[in-house]
Amino acid sequence: MSPLQWALLIFAVIAVVAVYVLSRRDRRAMNLEDPPESTPRARQLDIFGAEGQQFDEFGVGKPRKLEPRFDQAGDGDALAPAPTPVPVRGPTLNPAAIPKPAVEARPVPSVASVADSKPQVQKIVSLLIAQPTGQPISGVELHAALIGQRLSFGARQIYHRTLRNEIVFSVASLLKPGHLDPALAEDFQTPGLTLFMVLPGPVRAADAIRDMISTADRLALALGAEVYDAKKQVFTPSSARELQQDIESWARQHLPG
C-alpha cells in the first residue's frame, strides 16, 4: 500500500473509535439524568395499574405477595419473622362489632327442574373506589366504613349486602384474591375496593343497583375516596343515571315480570 492509502486507513480507524467513545459517553450522561416527575394524571392512573394492569370480571386486579404467617408454616418449615405492623390512622376496630359471616344458602334445584329450565342470562356490574392520589386505604378505616354500611363479612373472605342469606352485591379489595379479613385489619392496606353484583339476584335489579350505587357513594365519602366506573372513569351523577337505565333496560329484556 502507498503511504497515502496507509494514512487514509489510519484516519478511518481513528474516526470510528472516536464516534464509539462519544456515543458511549452520551448514553451514560442520559442515564444519569433524573427521570421527570409523574404528572397528577399519571399518578391517578397508577391506582388501577395503568401499565398492563388487567382486571377480571369483578374488577379485581393483579395478585399481591402475602407475607408468610406462623399458622401457615408446614412441618419442618423455617418460620419467617412476623411482618412489621404498618401504622394506620382511624378508629380502633372493635372485633365485637364485626358481623357474623353470612351463610350463603341457595335452594338446590331438583334434577327435573334443571333439565326443564333454560339457561339464564347473567349480567355483572362493578364499581371501583380509590383515592385519586393513589394513597392506600388503611384496614382499620376500611372495615369500620364497611360495617357502618351494614355489610356482612362472609363467603370468599369479603363483604356482602345480603337479603335472607342471599347475596345482593359484594365488596372486595382491588388486589387479588380480594380478601378483606377483619382479623388482619391492623396490618392491612389496599389501593381501593371493587363493588360487584351478579344479576339476576334476590331483589329487583333496579333496587339492587340503586343500593350498590348509594353504598359506593357513602363508602367513598367515609374513606375520603372517589367512585369510578368499570372503565376506571370518575363515576358522576350522570354516570349513575345511565347505569340505572342500562340495568332497567337489561332487566326488561331478560327477566320475567
Image (cartoon, rainbow, N blue to C red):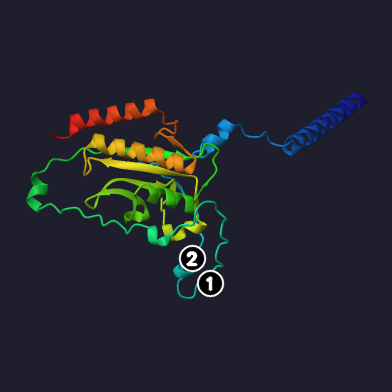
What residue is shown with label 1?
Answer: 78
Q: Closer to the camera, 106 or 241?
A: 241
Residue 85 vs 43, above or below: the answer is below
- Badge 2 crowding class, 10 Å Cα cut-off, few under 14, some 14 to 19, many 20 or more, is few
x, y percent for residue 208? 27, 39
Where 86 sits versus 121, above or below? below
Q: In this view, does 159 lie above or below 78?
A: above
Residue displayed at 53% across by 72% down: 78
Of the residues tagged 2 and 1, which is closer to the observer? Answer: 2
The residue labelled by disc 2 is 69
Quadrant in the picture for the N terminus: top right
Q: Which of marks 2 and 1 is nearer the N terminus?
A: 2
Looking at the picture, how far across and down is residue 72, in whole percent? 45, 68
Disc 2 marks a residue whose amino acid type is Arg
Q: Residue at x 57, y 55 (%)?
A: 87
SS category of the residue bearing label 2: loop
Is residue 207 visible in the rendered image? The answer is: yes
**Residue 9 sits in quarter:** top right
Q: Distance between the residues labelled 2 and 1?
A: 11 Å
Q: In which quarter of the image is residue 214?
A: top left
Q: Quadrant of residue 122?
A: top left
